[in-house]
Image (cartoon, rainbow, N blue to C red):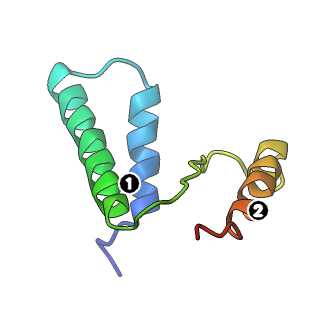
Amino acid sequence: MAGIVSTQDVNKNAEKQLYAGPQSRWRELRFTFRIIGEFIQGFRALHFVGPCVTIFGSARFEEGHTYYKLARELGLPSAFWDSR
């Protein structure tokens, strides 16, 4: 399917640009507003879930990495907590 770009590819390109160094003020402002928008969207979604615990992670570590394994060990018990 020509012309279709995955979200993962877009995120990688945005990340490469971020690490490339300072960009134009307009580009950095757009990037900032996009990130703020993602936070607002996420918090609005969580608002309707009710009491919960959120564990944020990072996609920068491969599954075999020590930090990845530690995050899974931390998150697993929380999946079985009873909120009642």
**For this view, does 59 lie left or right of residue 70?**
left
Q: Quadrant of residue 64?
A: bottom right
SS at circle 1: helix
State the mark number for residue 10: 1
Please state which amino acid type lies under the numbered disc 2. Pro
The residue pinned by badge 2 equals 77
Q: Residue 53: x percent and y percent?
A: 55, 55
Question: Given contact means CB atoms under 8 Å apart, are the residues at marks 1 and 2 in contact?
Answer: no
* Position in image of residue 10 (x %, y %): 38, 54
Q: Residue at x 76, y 52 (%)?
A: 74
Q: Is residue 80 left or right of residue 21?
A: right
Marks 1, 2: nearer the viewer: 2
Along the viewing direction, whichever of 76 and 37 lies nearer the viewer: 76
What secondary structure is found at the residue carrying circle 2? helix
Task: Residue 23: name its quadrant.
Answer: top left
- How far is disc 1 from disc 2 in space, using C-alphas? 33 Å
